[in-house]
Image (cartoon, rainbow, N blue to C red):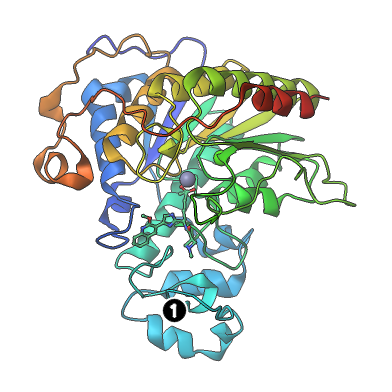
Amino acid sequence: SNGITRPKGHTVSFHYNSGVEDMHFGKTHPMKPWRLTLTKHLVLGYGLQYAMDTYVAMPASKDQVRAFHDPDYVDFLKEVSPQTFETLCENPRYQRFIPPKHEGDTVDLGPFNLSTSPGADCPVFDGMSEYLFLYTGATLAATNQLLTGQSDIAINWSGGLHHAHKSEASGFCYINDIVLAILDLLHLYPRVLYIDIDVHHGDGVEEAFQRQPRVMTLSYHRYGPYDETGHKFFPGTGDLADTGLKGTIGEHFALNVPIPSGIDDRQYKYLFESITSRAIDAYKPKAIVLQCGADSLGGDRLGQFNINIKQHGECVSFVKKQGLPLLILGGGGYTARNVARAWCHETALATDNGANLPDRIPLDLVPRPQAFTGRAHGDGMLFPKFQRDHKNDCVEADLEYMVKRLEW
Ligand code: TV1
Ligand code: CA
Ligand code: ZN
């Protein structure tokens, strides 16, 4: 099978339900199900299914989602669709969740930060409810696989939705599958380390565990003014000085690495490896959750870094090398062909097949139609030369300062 072999000494499981591909956030919305379809086809095209155990995920139950989220929010998410939205909004039970209007608001926000207006970050769309409970179900199945010792590494590329709050959707995220996974891991492991290499700050996860010393959160993200207008890069949190809720026992158990635009492989490697290794040495976690948002890659539609797939993958290898139970999740990623390349490559790294992927993929096994035409999907090449198109604002001394500042 293409020279793909099962890893010796550890077991990898892959959790997915193609039902997540039926969702559609909206015509111009950057979150595209196509990236998951393409990832699946690349993984299968290479024969990586022979290197791991593959499971079709079941949807999460409402009870499982209530372990973190507000019960009213969970009921709303289960019932909501473009057809039911207006009626649900009129239900007094949900009225108290309508956010206040602010001057300059461009979209009308309904309860829980959800909206049917075009241009909303968290739209209500067809197939939404099914999608949410499926990606969450896949993460919880992956988590269970680690808890029962049936896997050493468990992967769900459709998960990693790090911005969702207890009773509020945010930044394309509705159910925080990461928080739910970590809550489950805490039943067995005394300390869990959460690492987030998405270009955005993992604010929802950090907030959920801001009083919890048994979870350390560590996010690497773009931080600072977005452009000349002075708007902050989303979500605008994650300063170097933010290290957990002051005055609680959770203080010092959140770490943030704010990064200027244009960071390159060498600079990212320096930050990631020095800070992550110090965090692991000091905290001694018993399990790790790694959010692998692919919007930190160069050429991403929303991201502003210049990281290549090679370095993104080296973060995964570096974490895997620690030999701890590892939950690998997806997250952002808005240039579909690069997302698929990265996550397929990282599936190969997890199964020790990093060196076994041929340069040319078996194209006949990858679906073509919609994908390789038109602007949204780029120039029609699956493995294009990487665009490093963001001005590098990284000052070496500042990067060094961040490492020093976070040293124990
Ligand atoms: C509809 C249609 C929604 C086109 C949203 C980019 C759109 C964005 C759209 C967009 C867009 C954001 C903000 C909104 C401040 C808010 C999965 C009032 C071309 C994990 C989430 C980014 C990232 C949210 C999620 C961000 C993740 N950027 N076009 N929206 N405004 N929201 O800036 O971390 O990757 O951009
Ligand atoms: Ca991040
Ligand atoms: Zn992101």
Label 1 secondary element: loop
Q: Which of these two is toward me, 271 or 171?
A: 271
- Which residue is pictured at 24% across the width and 61% down the height? 27
In this rendering, the answer to whether 181 lies above or below 356 is: below
| Whether the residue under disc 1 has CB within 8 Å of ligand 1 | no
Locate residue 40 relative to residue 60 in the image: left or right. Answer: left
- Which residue is pictured at 52% across the width and 61% down the height? 170
In this rendering, the answer to whether 68 lies above or below 215 is: below
> Residue 167 at what x, y percent from top left?
60, 68
Residue farthest along the front direction in this orientation: 228
Q: Which of these two is toward me, 188 or 336?
A: 336
Q: Which of these two is toward me, 216 or 27?
A: 27
Q: Residues within 10 Å of mark 1 (few under 14, many from 20)?
A: some
Q: Residue type at mark 1? A: Asp
Q: Quadrant of the N terminus?
A: top left
Whether residue 221 appears in this view of the structure is yes
> Residue 387 at what x, y percent from top left?
32, 28
Q: Quadrant of the C terminus?
A: top right
Residue 364 picture quarter: top left
> Residue 5 at what x, y percent from top left?
34, 12
Q: Which residue is mark 1?
A: 108
